[in-house]
Image (cartoon, rainbow, N blue to C red):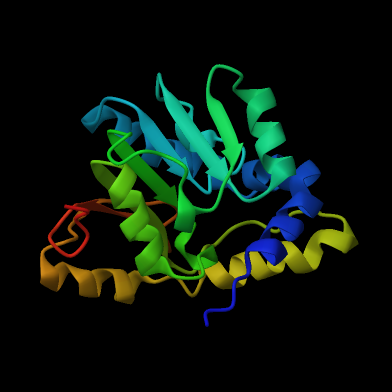
Amino acid sequence: MLRTRKAEIAKAFDGVAEYYDKYMEETGHVESQRRVARFIKENEQGLVLDVATGTGMMLEPFDDGVGIDLSVEIVRRAKEKQPDKSFLVSDVHYLPFKTKAFDLGISCLAFLWFDDPEAALKEMLRVCRKVYLVEEEGVPARKRIEIPDRLKHFFETIEKLEREVFITELDAYRASGMYGRVFEADIDGSHKFVCWMAQSTNLYSTT
């Protein structure tokens, strides 16, 4: 049986929620993700589902959206920042939405946290007509920032995981006609944000 990390991940993000936005801002994550979100917004319309939303920065450009995350504290901060959007605690592997409830799904820098990435994508494609997956490629050349000692291990773990993204694994799906790279942006000359687009195929269809 697949060992779930759900409780561990939720607890970890609950514990760093107070510092999460500061870390994202000072390391350049915020502006990078906003650039990707703006690109997607220029090409898409409709109701958006943001999986592993964090504090909701990927939803900022969209008029109507729902964000889900495992962390109660992270979701609470997202609601405070964007009271016009809906945020809830939920697991991507078991989304509490009807089939094709959303026009668009987004997952940014999140697949590394999922117990079963393939099952997670299948569930996203069940509730979304189209899905964008965003990951980083290469080693981020971010400036070091001062964070409390008690939080250093967590954020160091995040940066390590980001260097082990599923770029090769995701590209392999292209052979099935499921993926295509639709966006690549050099962020600082040493790595890229890479965006794939996925739509329902026979393999992932619910019909």
Horizontal side of 4 relative to 40 (left or right) equals right
**Foreground residue among 200 and 173:** 200
Across and down, in percent, residue 86 comes to: 54, 27
**Residue occupying the point 19% across, 55% down:** 205
**Residue occupying the point 46% across, 48% down:** 95
**Residue occupying the point 59% across, 22% down:** 82
> Residue 106 occupies which quadrant of the picture?
top left
Q: Is residue 109 visible?
A: no
Across and down, in percent, residue 157 comes to: 67, 70
Horizontal side of 101 relative to 108 (left or right) equals left
Q: Is residue 15 above or below residue 74?
A: below
**Residue occupying the point 45% across, 36% down:** 34
**Foreground residue among 169 and 152:** 169
Across and down, in percent, residue 18 comes to: 80, 42
> Residue 79 occupies which quadrant of the picture?
top right
Instruction: Return the residue found at the far right.
Output: 149
**Foreground residue among 87 and 93:** 93
Q: Is residue 137 visible?
A: yes
Q: Is residue 164 above or below residue 206?
A: below
Across and down, in percent, residue 32 comes to: 47, 44
